[in-house]
Image: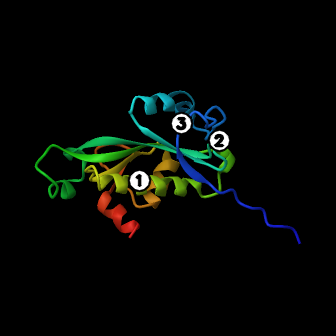
Amino acid sequence: MADPVEKPKFTFEPLSPKHDRAAFSCGIPALDNYIKTQAGQSVRKNLSAVFVLTPDGKTIAGYFTLSQYSLRLDEIPEEIAKKLTKHSEVPATLIGRLATSIDYRGHGLGEMLLMDALKRCLKVSQQIGSWAVIVDAKDENAFTFYKKYGFNELPSVPNRLFMMIATISKMFE
């Protein structure tokens, strides 16, 4: 009887120089280019936090970015917005990019990345106000992916979706 193939154990880490950014490919040029050429600068300039999912401390199996965001009240569905505030904007957290390496497709890493990002957003919202998590779906596959996990469309901005922190909190109770 053959030994079962052991699945790699993945860990999340903040992006650092030890990670092999040049080898990453998810098949979407904008996401590949970002991790290869811009992510380090974004981190150094405090424009976003970049987290990588790695099986060995070097290889990037996937990544996501988080940054603070401000959502205009007129972008939020009216039935929700009228219950929120009199201010013109509400604080949010943006998952700016989320990508899985082609080499690791089919291992459920997209869900792992999203759940880790949402947990981090929830934790940060307990320290710094954030009403929702915002994502911009790059294509129809990404749109379907986010909808599957309960994100709702922001009708005023095509392919922009949101999930309220209150909903995320219930996911992890």
Question: Where does residue 92 sit, x and y in percent of width and height?
Answer: 29, 47
Name the residue: 54% across, 34% down: 35
Q: Which residue is mark 1?
A: 120
- Identify the mark nearer the N-term, 3 or 2: 3
Label 2 sits on what residue type?
Lys
Q: Quadrant of the N terminus?
A: bottom right
Q: Left or right: 98 with respect to 56?
A: left
Q: Which residue is mark 2?
A: 58
- Identify the mark nearer the N-term, 1 or 2: 2
Q: Left or right: 90 with respect to 135?
A: left
Question: Where does residue 80 sit, x and y in percent of width and height?
Answer: 21, 57
**Where 75 sits versus 21, above or below?**
below
Name the residue: 61% across, 37% down: 19
| Circle 2: element type | loop
Question: Where does residue 123 sit, x and y in percent of width and height?
Answer: 36, 56
Q: Which residue is mark 3?
A: 31
Label 3 crowd (10 A; few <14 / some 14-19 / many >=20)? many
| Circle 3: element type | helix
Q: Give the quarter of the image for residue 83.
A: bottom left
Q: CA distance from mark 3 to mark 1?
A: 21 Å
